[in-house]
Image (tube, helix red, strand yellow):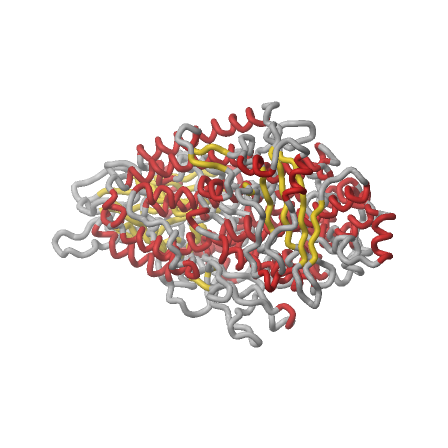
Amino acid sequence: MRCPRASKLSQRNPPLATSRTAKAKMLKTPLHEAESARSFFLLHKPFLAGHGTASLPVRRRQSFHTKKQKKSSVRFVSRNIIKAEVSSTTSTTEKSIKVKAIVTVQVTVGGFFSNLGLTRGLDDISDLLGKSLLLELVSANLDPKSGREKATVKDYALRLGQEENEVKYESDFVVPPDFGDIGAILVENEHHKEMFIKNIVLDGFPNGTVNVSCDSWVHSKFDNPEKRIFFTNKSYLPSDTPDGLKRMREKELEILRGTGVGERKTFERIYDYDKYNDLGDPDSKEELARPVLGGKEHPYPRRCRTGREPTVKDPLSESRSSSVYVPRDEAFSEVKQLTFSVKALSSVLNALLPSIETALIDSDLGFPYFTAIDSLFNEGANLPKPENLGFFQSILSWLVKLFKDGGDDLFQFETPEMIDRDKFSWFRDEEFSRQTLAGLNPYSIELVTEWPLKSKLDPKIYGPAESAITREVIEQEIKGVMTLDEAIEGKKLFILDYHDLFLPYVYKVREIEGTTLYGSRTLFFLTHDCTLRPLAIELTRPAGNDKPQWRQVFTSNWDATSCWLWRLAKAHVNAHDSGYHQLVIHWLRTHCSCEPYIIAANRQLSAMHPIYRLLLPHFRYTMEINALARESLINGGGIIETSFSPGKYSMELSSVAYDQLWRFDMEALPADLIRRGMAVKDPKAKHGLKLTIADYPFANDGLDLWAAIKQWVSDYVNHYYPEPSLIESDQELQDWWTEVRTKGHEDKKDEPWWPVLKTQADLTHILTTIIWVVSGHHAAVNFGQYIYAGYFPNRPTITRTNMPTEEPSETEFLNFLKKPEFALLKCFPSQIQATKVMAVLEVLSNHSPDEEYIGDAMEPSWAECPIIKAAFERFSGSLKELEGLIDARNADINLKNRFGAGIVPYELLKPVSKPGVTGMGVPNSISI
């Protein structure tokens, strides 16, 4: 139920009016004519191919309950489709109700790959003989006499025809008058291949249409004989579940939980937990062995269990495979797959350009001039077919095809908006500072509240705890405006602190060829116009390897040498910020920490539970994109390890951050801002918070979005839970929240800060936090990646050389003095590192054409309830107001962190976007 949303239920086949006599005549087709028809039918492509086909008239099959043969009609329509639709029947007799079911099946984009083989022909025969889908209507009521579930009403669904990307099937039921309300539909797929069912609509009941939203892959009965259960769109708390549905409600959850044993199959929908034990590949290469993340030594959230065999060399690690299991409905839609693949391939093609003849031979080769970097965006090149491409090898054939079909535009990176607006903005201190508030990582800047700055690491191991940034340095840089004490008291001093987290990894990372690392602190001063000015950067190498501690403070002085050292120090800080952003702010705090919420919800909350239906759109595609990340981004030897400063220790470092820093109660935006000193509670201020920096674009827009989400969630929660006792007695809800803490985040299950779940306010806050993280938080730190990091000198992901002042040889320092520009270029990522990252960031910054944005579309189950429908419409309206408010802020000349010459407007939290790399749009979920 996590694939593309169904189209409007009103979009159905138009009434067909042709001769009833013709239909009746066709229904009497002799056997030999039927055989000819079958042979003719098999010569045509079936509906999964996505092409128009001839759907021959078929004999009506009787329902499993006796009923009269109804009169029908057919007509020929465009694209050689013969459609058969029974005229609408709502008539009732004293003994029965005639009900029609229309099943909408999604035509798959890649269906033509399924045309080959015997099973495709067998499925065509099933369609021809009217045995495509077996439907069973389930009563919501028990039999009053026996106290047992009523017998289901069964019928096969017959294929009517195809319109564009949908195929319609029809069933006709005769429902006993005492059957009661429809609570669910059982579906058995008689085909040999899975089928994506969008919805089922039942017409003919006295009380109106019954809608069943499926949006799910239904497995073939030949893969699994278990019938699928689809509940109607009406939501029920466990205590309100109709008696006739209680057993099925629990049975469906048991199926989704699985048994916890065996390797998962692609068609399954089983949700279970496992540690991150599949990042390494020790059987392939010893150097690709990686520690298991999850457990006492390396605390971490849990992922979805796949059940693959352990590796030979490390029984604790899971073997890798060409594809990674996710529950079937968690996978990308084919529109998403196509977009993701094409964007990925075109971007990787771009990455080949500067390195085909050189970088793939010398992977350490850097850019010789800044003009060589510019050429990535404004020049083209031919694509020879190299033999050993490493990173690119598996998709080379696709690359060549895309080159032939796609034209010259595939050979160039798009110029990132930041550089397109101001080519030299990345060089300026003002932009360096501004991006801490309105850039790709607005989550790290903190208020300085104590002096001197001190490390919490053991000084016996890492050297003196007190920072080398002294009072004198700060007051000299403030230039007499105020004293240090006045600056701290006036909340004018801010810091990016990557000292304690990185320092223990400095020597480990330096053992990796072609990279280096420091611990760093960067201080900023808040000016009168709410902009930040950088004051000082401290870079530290701890004591170790028979060397004393080395550290130096750099400032932006006027002389040429100090100026270039300052630029090199900023490059190191930007690399630290890039690594921390990608590993902690982005991956850990959104993708990784949210997967347990999804697993627990599917295991413990029924599909008819109102809270499950509230959360469902916010889970879309997350497990699939996380599986792809484990496959090629965060794995041993993957993009992150080869292109970001922590190298092979990247994921281990994110585990340390999880252990030391991650708290669910601090994931709420207001709590996060307060924790970092960027806001204080103020009942008189908007949203009850006063920002420390008034012009903080991320926080300004984010708090408005947070408030809108909170109001919508509050309206929803209070409708279904008018009394707190209903929350405490809701066993499914309580089991979900318990499992999130004790299984999904098992390594932190005993922490005292987990919110309790007893009242409407508790539930509203928990749900608002989750929805914020998967929507607003993720959008703010993901969809600006290409805009701000596409031109890598602005945000290098790795630094390859030490500072020229760290124990330099005489030759090295003289080279720096002679050509400081070359020293900076040499420090930047190599050509292959830079272009690989640029290619990936272009993909990850891209909105798919089937993206679902927050507040943009109403779920069918919400529309069933007038109160929930009205609440969502208010929510949607508030987000449209937010869009206008963001536009107004970006046009305000007084807001210098989002308005000015060459400045990229802050639009990352504008709710809706068109497809592509746009730097705006807040999807419902972590979908990329």
Residue 633 is left or right of residue 120, and the answer is right
Rendering coords of residue 849 (x, y %):
56, 40
Q: Is 491 above or below relative to 104?
A: above
Q: Is 850 above or below relative to 800?
A: above
Q: Is 865 above or below relative to 397?
A: above
Asked if one can make out residue 342 in the rendered structure from this viewpoint, the answer is no
Q: Which one is nearer the viewer's eye here, 114 or 551?
A: 551
Residue 718 is left or right of residue 199, and the answer is left
Instruction: Identify the residue at image location x=59%, y=23%.
Output: 892
Rendering coords of residue 729 (x, y %):
24, 50
Residue 764 is left or right of residue 180, and the answer is right
Name the quadrant containing residue 855.
top left
Q: Which one is nearer the viewer's eye here, 169 or 890?
A: 890
Rendering coords of residue 554 (x, y %):
71, 46
Name the quadrant containing residue 482.
top right
Rendering coords of residue 815 (x, y %):
86, 52
Numbered marks: total: 0
Q: Which one is nearer the viewer's eye here, 663 or 141?
A: 663
Name the quadrant containing residue 370.
top right
Instruction: Identify the residue at image location x=42%, y=56%.
Output: 599
Asked if one can make out residue 657 in the rendered structure from this viewpoint, the answer is yes
Residue 841 is left or right of residue 256, and the answer is right
Residue that protrudes farthest toward the bottom in the picture: 312
